[in-house]
Image: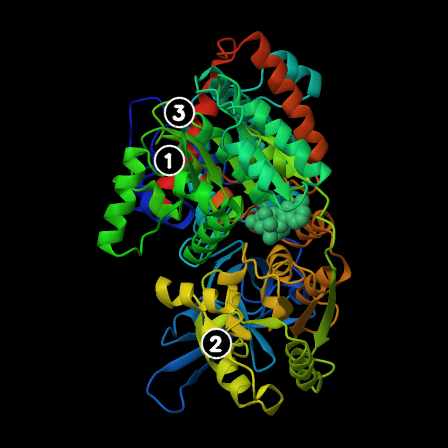
Amino acid sequence: MTDSEAVETLAPVTLDSKLATVVGGKTAVALGKAFGVLTVGDLLSHYPRRYARRGELSSISLLPLDENVTIVAEIRSVDERPMKARKGSIVEVKISDGRGILSLTWFNQAWRAKQLQPGMRGMFAGKVTDYRGHLQLTHPTYKLFGPGADDEPEMPTDAAAAKLWIEQPVAIYPATNTVASWQVAQTIAILLDSVGPVPDPIPPELRGERGLLPQGRAFELIHRPETDSDWRRARDTLRFTEAFVLQSALVQQRLTARQQQSTPRLPTPGGLLERFDAGLPFTLTADQQGVAAEISTDIAQTHPMNRLVQGEVGSGKTVVALRAMLAVADTGGQSALLAPTEVLAGQHLRSIARSLGPELASSLMPTLLTGQLPVAERRKALLRVVSGQAKIVIGTHALLGDKVTFFDLGLVVVDEQHRFGVDQREALRQKGAVPPHVLVLTATPIPRTVAMTVFGDLDVSTIAELPEGRQGIETFVVPLFEKPGWVTRVWTRLAEELALGRQGFVVCPAIAPKQLEEGAEVDPEAAAPASVETVLADLRRNPALASARIEPLHGRMTSEEKDQAMRAFAAGKIDVLVATTVIEVGVDVPNASAMVVLDADRFGVSQLHQLRGRVGRGGVPGLCLLVTSAEAETIARERVEAVAATLDGFELAQVDLELRREGDVLGSSQSGGRSSLRLLRVATDGDLIGEARGHAQRLSEHDPHLDTVPALREAVLRRLDDAERASLTKS
Ligand code: ADP
Ligand code: MG
């Protein structure tokens, strides 16, 4: 990537100009691949992660392992020697922050020994790994300060200027092993020099009131600050701008939704819903009744419902959703229930059929539609859907397929929302002749600011209480690092549960040794994570579990096999399921009392909470054992301890927010791609987000089409466009 690749253009450069028209094709492609950036505006919003100083060395002891880092360091020693076993030479360079040492190694690149001299300083980038107790940078790249560096300004000779040069913040960008931080900086400098006036998405009065910088100035100062206060001011401006544009986009979406026409769905007196309610074997909790009332009001309107129902695992969201489906069926309409996995879809079908009872089931014809149905069955299902016979259609994302046509789709229910993106919700919505009502269910409690940020276009209801008669769950951490012997105790404890006639789950991060289930995080050099195959074999040999029927359940089984295993487990024909996180969501077997999670530190807080929610669902108390080898006082261990410390999902969601990065919290489907948050932190910027929302709402009330702030309208469109692009790149 060099300046010579830059292409001269006559058209003025704007935020929407394609990168390739300004900086040359190769650079644009490399940046596009690395960061998903397409336009000038995209790259200008690729903000520095932090700022270094030429005169200040980065602390090596604080560097995270196995991440790409960029640091400022000094070269200590340079050593070139022939390789022992083969022909060729090794250059080994040690860099230091004054205390710690990192080594950099190159094979057959002897020229580096001449370029790199002890005493030189520069930026070094690569992945930090621990090789037999010594830290090293793998695939190292570097840019030296001063002489030898291509476009880096040399240290001035005059003392005052030199001091400035040493103290000036140097932007360090999120980088990859193909594009280094300083290459990003170079390209951004070209953009800043060529872009025309940047229009301001913040109305001038609001900008004045909050003391914000003009957009163009903010871009300049965040990327090329001369002092710390430069980038701080720029960051404040850009952070508010981000919140304001996002909230304006959400407010706009809400306004658009309100203007849509939908069919009001009112239950018929003496109809399906009434019959269902009459046969319900329990009374709804007060929270369930409250939410049910909100939903019936919503779906009786002429514009579509857009509601999120959040409630703990087992709080009884499904029955609330089912009641809405029955109201829709009373008007002759159909409902679609979108489940994240085949297992869950199958289970929903069975439990819905069960709670409807034979008579209602025969008139509603609940129908399963998943990708793995045999062709003949699939055809039959499709026919029932298009004819309108099936009033309740349950499926996985196969429901979104082109071939699926509804006769009268009145309601879309999305279960376990965090597995689905906005785009999928949208795709299903498109299946109605008129926009259907939409109900989103989630067992992952959502802190208020996240709800406002990610689900700002939805109304939110909460089911906080659990139905009576739940026995509670006891959770214990089994710390193998300190107490390796306790693992035996885990299996005898499981055996004791089975002896009481109960069942259990054993969850592993991997399916087979060395092969991982999607979503699990791994470090290739660390000990292999527990796998279903190994653990299954071990448990079958374990004398404590000699009489137990132990079977696997994981994502690599066919859906038929999975379904069979789930059914057998539900019917009590299997005692222990050794599984991956396929059982994470929604699986409902009241007799299951034990949940053993192996390598629990490899799972996130909400995942662990979800897993735990699989037990203690019926009249038997639950037992959850979180087995971990993580050392005390590491973040990994802290996550596990946090889950053991409380059953309160909201509290855990907050912990999760604080311990994990945003993207992980929101789930890749929501935070993926370029539509994710940049400078906003939902854990800490709640007030700012709330204020931005207020301003956005007031503006949209006076000026629903944002005619007075065209730059905001464009920014909103750009934001929606980003979301669309993110969803396209995913499929
Ligand atoms: P969620 O989807 O919120 O995790 P479910 O809807 O699957 O929870 O409900 C869990 C179990 O509790 C189901 O077996 C359901 O029949 C039962 N249930 C739901 N509401 C009540 C209630 N009010 N009283 C007793 N049991 C209930
Ligand atoms: Mg559920």
Q: Report which residue position mark 2 lands on.
A: 551
Q: Which residue does the numbered mark 1 point to in the structure image?
A: 427
The answer to whether the residues at label 3 and label 1 have Cβ atoms under 8 Å apart is no
Placement of 113 over or under 610, stated as above or below: below
> x, y (%) of residue 65?
58, 67
Give above or below for 139 relative to 703: below
Look at mark 3 in the image and give the residue it sits on.
14
For discs 3 and 1, the disc positioned in front in the rendered view: 1
Q: State the residue at coordinates (57%, 35%).
A: 308
| Above/below status of 635 relative to 717 | below
Depth check, front residue: 176 or 621: 621
Labels in figure, total: 3
712 above or below 351? Answer: above
Amino acid type at circle 1 is Ala
Residue nearer the viewer, 75 or 104: 104
* Relative side of 404 to 572, left or right: left
Residue type, mark 2 in image: Glu
Q: Residue at x 55, y 84 (%)?
A: 539
Q: Secondary structure at mark 1?
A: helix
Q: Cα distance, mark 2 to mark 1?
A: 37 Å
Who comes first in sequence, dot 2 or dot 1? 1
